[in-house]
């Protein structure tokens, strides 16, 4: 029995390819060929390719890995404090 390529994806830990019964894409290019669109997935969410490689939707394309949040630069200098007029 041949299983069709998915037409969509559901985010999760792990997520799933949709519709139910479709096969996981075998490559990142194949994952991107399904025509998925939507908001970027949140921290830790991913789907798996057929070989178990983790991929996630970054809001534009499927990329390797699991979704992460970009953290603020802790090395940035502190903001200057406002100067209040002294009475």
Image (cartoon, rainbow, N blue to C red):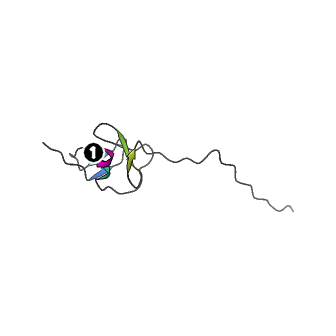
**Mark 1 falls on what kind of element?**
loop
What is the count of numbered marks? 1
Residue 15: give x, y in percent of width and height: 33, 44
Q: How many C-alpha atoms fall within 10 Å of the one at disc 1: few (<14), some, or many (≥20)?
A: many
Magenta span includes 35? no
Magenta span includes 22? yes
Identity of the residue furthest to the left in this view: 1
Residue 68 left/right relative to 12? right
Residue 72: give x, y in percent of width and height: 58, 48
Residue 30 left/right relative to 66? left
> What residue sits 60% from the left and 47% below the top?
73
Q: Main secondary structure of the magenta part?
A: loop
| Residue position marked by numbered label 1 in the rendering | 25
- Check the image and report above or below for 14 versus 9: above
- Quarter placement of the C terminus: bottom right
> What residue sits 29% from the left and 37% below the top?
51
Residue 48: which quarter of the image? top left
The region drawn magenta spans 20-30
Q: Nearer the viewer, residue 58 or 30?
A: 30
Identity of the residue furthest to the top in this view: 52
- Quarter placement of the N terminus: top left
Residue 75: give x, y in percent of width and height: 65, 45
Residue 64: give x, y in percent of width and height: 39, 43
> What residue sits 23% from the left and 44% below the top?
23
> What residue sits 30% from the left and 56% below the top?
35
């Amino acid at each position: 029995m041949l299983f069709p390529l998915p037409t969509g994806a559901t985010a999760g830990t792990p997520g799933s390819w949709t519709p139910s019964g479709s096969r996981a894409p075998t490559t990142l290019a194949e994952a991107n060929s399904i025509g998925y669109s939507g908001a970027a997935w949140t921290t830790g969410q991913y789907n798996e390719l057929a070989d178990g490689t983790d991929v996630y939707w970054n809001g534009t394309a499927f990329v390797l890995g699991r979704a992460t949040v970009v953290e603020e630069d802790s090395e940035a200098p502190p903001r200057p404090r406002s100067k209040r007029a002294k009475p």
